[in-house]
Structures are given as structure tokens and as C-alpha cells.
Image: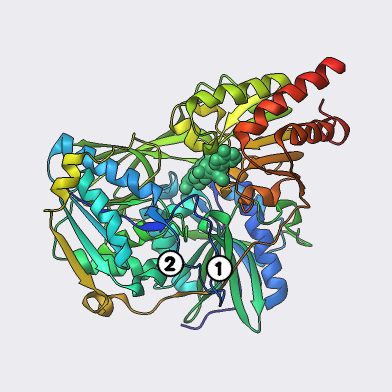
Amino acid sequence: MSARGVILVITEQREGKLNRVSYETITAAQKIAAETGWSVEAVVMGAQVSVAAGEIAAKKLEKVYQIHSPALGQYTADGYIAALKPFLAEKLPSLVLFPHTYQVRDFAPKLALALDRPLISDAVSYKYESGKLLFTRQMFQGKFVADVSFSGEPPYFATVQAGSFRADQAENGPAPAPIETVHAIIENSSIRVKPHEMYKEAKQAVDLTQAEIIVSVGRGIKEQKNIEMAAKLAEALGGELAASRPICDAGWLPIERQIGSSGQTVSPKLYLALGISGAIQHLVGMKGSRSVIAVNKDPEAPIFDIADVAVVGNLLEIVPALIEEVKKAKAEA
Amino acid sequence: MKILVCIKQVPQKDAPLKLNESGSWIREDVSYEVNEPDAYALEEALRQKEKNGGEVVVVTAGPARAQQVLREALAKGADRAIHLEGDEFVRLDPASTAKAIAAAVKSENFDLIFTGLQSDDYGYAQTGVLLAEVLGWPHSTIILHIAKEGDGLKLKRELESGYFQDMEMPLPAVLTIQSGGNKLRYATLMGIKQAKNKPMTKLGWADVASAVGKNGLKIERLYIPVKQKRTETIDGPPAEVARKLVDKMRNEMRIL
Ligand SMILES: Cc1cc2nc3c(=O)[nH]c(=O)nc-3n(C[C@H](O)[C@H](O)[C@H](O)COP(=O)(O)OP(=O)(O)OC[C@H]3O[C@@H](n4cnc5c(N)ncnc54)[C@H](O)[C@@H]3O)c2cc1C
């Protein structure tokens, strides 16, 4: 196989709307292209994708492929792989880039191996060093990062973590990119799973997206009874209480107060993280906060990388003192 | 149902990690534990066995120290264990790990294979999905709930932003399991005792090497991430920290 100098971005759409991380992935591709001299093309796939294809064609791309089939109406790994495997085998791009979403996690590794190619998942940036493309990704829950290279010949596959590149930096083209329609031929019998409609469970009684101050607790709170302490701090500050996933999994707070990729995304004026390590799935839900104060006993905790104010210490001692101090300040005001 | 659960030993959550001298990997003299989502995968398998009968087999690919996670799984109720033992397994890429595991279990007829949805060390989130590709099986990821229905399964899958999806899936299949779907059990004293007599098969690198092939990914270097934000550190006794924080909230963040 001899690959063409093309970066192919496999975008993701739902009901005709592309998600934000698809645009971020376009930005990543455009930046890599500027260094490698490769060109960028994009794929939109589904049962009806002409609107989404038209939307993405405004970006600076050599070409947009709309791959469609009734069998792609609802996502299945089997359907997506059946559509993409022959397409990629024919196009032979140098690099195939995906947004690192739940859907992509579900099929991209299988697709890459079906073509006998390696996939670097969840990249946060890239490096192009003497003709070699490396992707940088987090390891050990964000405590370290690694530069990872591919061996063998392209096509190479990589997925890009949400928030690693900026969607608003995806360049527009001078004129809309040409759109080519590809009819995917997918046997119904090749789709082995039967997905049902997606649904939400939580009643969503609280809307944390409107909160100006959020006090968020993580596993460092240690015991259920300590939640009370955090609740008092939230009350003193006039803010809302939220949590990382393990706290909601344990049933210490309802799931509608969970912040992160499988919970809510918030951007308050102050996000006060108590005993939260700063796993990426949590950070994506609160990165947009105007100020972040983090309290953690581990000076190396990844949460400090995105905090404005870092307090290295025991939250069980600091929170009671803070409640008193906030009350005092409010009384004076 | 005959279920295989893939589990991995990873550094303990709170363990302070240090880079080795060449910056190629972490220093290995840390405490280890079972990868958290894998513990949930095992829990789900044990519950399936309690409901539907069958057998639960656990497998790990890792050095001698990794036997500990197999012992714990046996003590919790797994029936037997397979240890792909060797330092070679530590630095495999996910495709190679999947091929090694597939080679180790190819003569057995499992109905289901569970893995955790990703590991806390590499975090590739690929091995389970790739195992399905090597075996030619269907798969699904980030699974929270599994019910046997007729000849197949009804699954509850987690999606982003608080959404879920149910789906039907035939057997055999590979599922990657999300944390938090069940409450984890502890090993009982009785279980720990019984575990000593449960079978533990050992295979080495030589037993699977021909099926594995070359790594497609290479970690060129490992390092501490560069900070993206200017962070101000506040320390001192709690009362002083509290005063400084309130001062910031009032005068800089202007939220008090
Ligand atoms: C697909 C997927 C989706 C996910 N979705 C989400 C999501 O939506 N939201 C989410 O939060 N997570 C999510 N996760 C889980 C995520 O990866 C982390 O496991 C989780 O965020 C960790 O929560 P934590 O920081 O509370 O716990 P830990 O990582 O265990 O961190 C606890 C922290 O507390 C500190 N600590 C301990 N004691 C004290 C003390 N006395 N004082 C101060 N600090 C202390 C420790 O140093 C440590 O940093 C998801 C994972 C996956 C794979």
C-alpha cells in the first residue's frame, strides 16, 4: 500500500448536526497539514447527511465525502466498519483522524485492526519531528504524558481528545469544498446488534449549568457523612453542590449533580474542587470555569494543572476553616 | 454462560509515581491494585454466573506480580485463572495484548468476554474492542447492565452527557464494562481459603509470541505534562489558607 498525502477526518453527526469535537478534529488536521504538507478531507456519514456535509464543506478542506446508507441511520459498529473499511482501503490516506467520542471508542479500534493498522487513541496534541508524526497522550490518569509513534506504513489512525484543539480555529475555505457522495453497500445481515433509541434517566431537577459557584466533591471526601461539610460550604457561598463520578456511583449524591463527560458540563465563576484528582473525563465538564480552586493532598494531582489556585492539604481540615471564614466575610459585607 | 474476564494490574490510585532514569517508563517499585473497571467486569461476570449458571475464568497478561489480581478474583468467586506471565506483556500495545489473550483462550468456547472499559495506566480503551476483532465477534462498549434474553443479551450502554441506550446482542460477544454499575463484593475468608485450590494455568511469552507479531505503537518518551495555566499555590495552616482563599474570592474572583 502506498498512502496519499491526505488526512481524512471522520466527523460525527447526530440528527444532521456535527458535534463540536468534530470541528476540533478538523482544526487538529489543518494544523498537522500545515506542517506535513498533506491536504485535509472530511467524511460525514449517516442515513441523511447532506445538511451536515454542506455545513462542514465551509471549512478549508480539499473535499468532503458524504457516505450514506439507510443502514447508517442509527449507529452500529458493524455498519460503520462495513462502510469505512472498503472506503479507506481504496482512498489510502496517510492519516485518519477521529474525535475521541464514545461512538468512536466503540468502532475505531476495530476498524484500524481490520485494516491491520495501529490506532493512537485519545491524543491531546501532536509533534512532527524529522518526518515522523508523533501523538501526545495522557498516561496514568493524566499524571504523565507520552509521545507515541506508529510503526510500519500508513495509513495511521488517531483519535483526538475533546477540548485539545479549538473548534473556532478551524479555518474556513475560500469557497465551499466539493462534496462527493458515496453510497455504502451494507448487508442488513452484517449488523449483529440491535440498538434502541437513546434516553435520559435523571429527572434533571437541578440545572448546574446556571450556577455561578460550584463546590464539587471527589473521592478525597472519603466518607458519606463528610458530604454534609461540603454542602455547608456550598450553602455559605450561595453555590451548588456537585461531584465527580465515583461519588454519584456510590449514591452519595444524585447523578444529576455529576460533572464530566457522562454528566453535566458547567462553566461557573468559581469551581471549587475538593479531593478530585482531575481525570480528563471530569475536566471536560468543568474546564470552562472562570476560576478554579482545587484542594488536594497530592501536590502532583492533575487537577492542579488547570487550577488557578492550588491548595495542597487535607480538605477535611481546610473546609471547616473555610466555612467559618466565608461566613465571617458575608457577615461583614 | 461461560465468561472470560480480562483483568489488569495497575499502579494504585494514590501511589506517588516517579519516572525511571531514562524517562521511558515509571519506576516499578510502587504498590499495585486491580484496574478499577476490571473489578466491575469481574463483579458483573460473577452476578451473571449466580443468575444463569456457568463458569467465570479470569485472565491477565503481566509479570509475576500480576498474579495477585488473579488470586483476588479467585477469592471473590472466579472458578479458575490464566496467567500470561512475563515482563514482555507490560509494554505491548493493545492490538498485541488482544492477540496474546485470544491465542491463550482459542481452544475454549467462551460465550462472553468482559474487559474493563479502559485501564488506569495506558488508558487506550482499545483492548476489548480489538479482542472482538481478532475473534470475529460482535462487541459493545461502556456497558452498565447486562441481562440474558433468549439466546442473546439485552444491554444498557452509557452514552455521553447523561444519555443511555439499550441494545440487543447475540452471543458470543465481547463487552467492555463501565465502573459503578454494581456494588463490588469483598472476598470472604472462606473464598480466600478456597482460592488456594483453584486452578491457575500459566502460559509464557513463547506460548503466544507467534500469534502476537510486532507492536504497532511505540512510546518514545514519558514525561510530566507542561502546565497550561499559571497556578498560584496557597499553603499554611487551615485557618490561614481559608483567609487567603476568601481574600481571593472577594478581591480577585469577586464572588463574595
Ligand atoms: C467513559 C468514562 C466516563 C467517565 N465519566 C466521568 C464523569 O462524567 N465525571 C467524572 O467525574 N468522572 C468520570 N469518569 C471517571 C474518571 O475517569 C475518574 O475515575 C474520576 O473522575 C475520579 O474521581 P475522583 O477524582 O473523585 O477520584 P480519584 O481519582 O480517586 O481522586 C481522589 C483525589 O482525592 C485526593 N484526596 C484524598 N484524600 C484527600 C484529603 N483528605 N484531602 C484532599 N485531597 C484528598 C487524592 O489525592 C486524589 O487526587 C469517567 C470515566 C470513563 C472511562
Q: Which mark is residue A112?
A: 2
The percent coordinates of residue A25 (x first, y second) are 63, 58
- Say whether mark 1 and mark 2 are on the same chain: no
Q: Is residue B53 above or below residue A76?
A: above
Mark 1 lies on a secondary structure that is: loop
Q: Which mark is residue A91?
A: none
Mark 2 lies on a secondary structure that is: helix
Mark 1 lies on residue: B19
Residue at the image point whose x is 81% and y is 18% from the top: A330
> Label 1 sits on what residue type?
Leu
Determine whether, in the image, residue B250 is placed left or right of residue A192: right
Q: Please state which of residues A141 and A131 is positioned toward the viewer in this rendering.
A: A141
Residue at the image point whose x is 48% and y is 54% from the top: A104
Instruction: Report whether the residue tagged 2 is closer than 8 Å to ligand 1.
Output: no
The percent coordinates of residue A32 (x first, y second) are 67, 70
Marks 2 and 1, how far apart at CA? 31 Å
Q: Residue B191 occupies which quadrant of the picture?
A: top left
> Label 2 sits on what residue type?
Ala
Q: List the single residue furthest toward the top.
A: A331
